[in-house]
Image (cartoon, grey):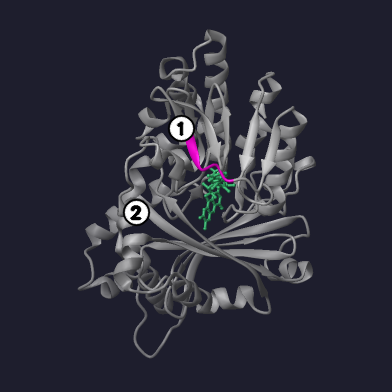
Amino acid sequence: MLLAQAGMNVLIVERGAAAGSKNVSGGLIYSKLIADIYPQFWAEAPVERAITSHGLVMLAENSSVGLDFRSQASAEPPYNAFSVLRARFDPWMASKAEEAGAALITGVTVDALRMENGRVAGIQAGPDEIAADVVVVAEGTRSLLLKNAGLREDFQPHDVSLGVKEVIALPPSVIDERFQCSPETGMAYTLVGSTCGIEGGGFLYTNKDSLSLGVVVKIDSLYKSKLQPHQVLDAFKAHPLVARLIAGGEVVEYSAQTVHRGGFHLASRLYGDGYVVAGSAARLLMNNILTLRGMDFAILSAAAAARAVLAAREKGDFSAAGLSGYTGFIKQSPIYQDWETFKDVYPLLENGRLFDLYPNLAAEVMEDLFAPGSRAGKKALASLREHLRGKASMLTLAGDLLQISKGMVL
Ligand SMILES: Cc1cc2nc3c(=O)[nH]c(=O)nc-3n(C[C@H](O)[C@H](O)[C@H](O)COP(=O)(O)OP(=O)(O)OC[C@H]3O[C@@H](n4cnc5c(N)ncnc54)[C@H](O)[C@@H]3O)c2cc1C
């Protein structure tokens, strides 16, 4: 959109039958950053609900322990976050690019980046070759075009997770009552545990007349467990809390996609002669269990890429040198600043205690505190020590709590 607005000839090629038809996302989008690109988008974009409530819940075997945050301020502009369904939201974004003068073709797969004298010089789709001064590669996580052109290295299994997601239809009135929302507002749950001990987490977001529910689990850990992704999702849905929240709903959509842990450590590979890479193709996202932000990272990195392309056009130089401003534009962007703030929490993804030991520990302590029995009551710390014995030290717990608190950006 930004390139077309600046008068460039832009062609958007999408392999799905429509924009958004192939995209997988939980659908929680943070509005303040997006509003920099699409001012007051909520007034016209097909958003689902303004998210005014966040639940952060640990799922133990038969119980759950959580935090519930409700904010009336988030029900008003500029809001904080919205739930969206990509099949509805993406066509709106595509229409904005078209209004600005870009041409969109759907149902066409780009087979390869067209190379000329060692530089990217356009795209190839079936028998058609289309020349371009610059290609903005925004092909998503698998980034096969970049791989096949030798423009990215292989992924490491420990960097990759698999997300499986369902959309579950429920009448709006049931959602309003069950999640204590108004018809315009909604709830977002981050759920840790009940993923068969596999490193990862779950989410449950309210849409207008459906729920988006899913788990994102580390691929290497899933592989070791010998479980299929749908088995992990079924176990997650069978947890008493989750089962109650989705009761009576009908699964109307199922999708799965890989997702990276993300980061800016690959900034040097964001551009080259004749191309720039944006969004999750460049692994620009934040995925640390407590947060999975990729849509705002994709939109803002695309905006930074557009600035770099416009700067290159000024110089009449679409080589790597001409496009090198991209790194600087990315670093000025709030997504980079958020990444800098939270980048040290990634070991959370590898901390097995978080997915099994701690949810059960929290539940056991709560049982002691809230269910007086025949034995003498215990103070919280004594209960914690007792249930932790033989499983982990208090020092380990304190270190993990510190790490978790650093990772909280909901
Ligand atoms: C289960 C799950 C839950 C998530 N939850 C959230 C969330 O709640 N909030 C959030 O912000 N992020 C979330 N994410 C991450 C987020 O969805 C991604 O980071 C984001 O969609 C990346 O956007 P993108 O445009 O870079 O890539 P994509 O959304 O993957 O878009 C790539 C597009 O390129 C097209 N394409 C690919 N190859 C070709 C080709 N060769 N020719 C033509 N077209 C092609 C695809 O069809 C697709 O439309 C989640 C991810 C998963 C998997």
The residue indicated by pointer 1 is 336
**Considering the numbered disc 1 on the image, is that residue within a helix, a strand or a loop?**
helix
Quarter containing the N terminus: top right
Q: Earlier in the sequence, mark 2 or mark 1?
A: 1
**Picture quadrant where residue 13 is located:** top right
Q: Is residue 309 visible?
A: yes
Point out the stretch of residues depicted in magenta.
109-113
Q: Residues within 10 Å of mark 1 (few under 14, many from 20)?
A: many
Q: Does the residue labelled 1 lie within 8 Å of ligand 1?
A: no
Which residue is at a point 67% across and 54% down the rendered structure image? 85
- Residue lying farthest to the bottom in this orientation: 374
- Which residue has dot 2 on it? 348
Residue 305 in percent (x, y) is at 53, 27
Q: Which residue is drawn at 41% across and 73% down?
A: 228
Residues at marks 2 and 1, CA–CA distance in whole angstroms: 20 Å
Residue 62 is a magenta residue: no
| Horizontal side, residue 216 vs residue 68: left or right | left
> Horizontal placement of 261 versus 137: left or right?
left
Q: How many labels does the image show?
A: 2
Which one is in front in this view, the residue at disc 2 or the one at disc 1? 1
Residue 306 percent location from the top left of the image: 57, 25
Residue 148, position in %: x, y? 40, 41
Magenta region's main secondary structure?
A: loop
- Where on the picture, by quarter, is residue 103? top right
- Is 30 or 325 nearer to us in this picture? 325
Q: Residue 212, relative to residue 31: is it above or below? A: below
Q: Which residue is drawn at 48% across and 51% down?
A: 291
Note whether 107 is above or below 196 in the view shown: above
Is 111 inside the magenta-drawn segment?
Answer: yes
Residue 397 location in percent, x, y?
28, 60
Return the mark for residue 257.
Answer: none
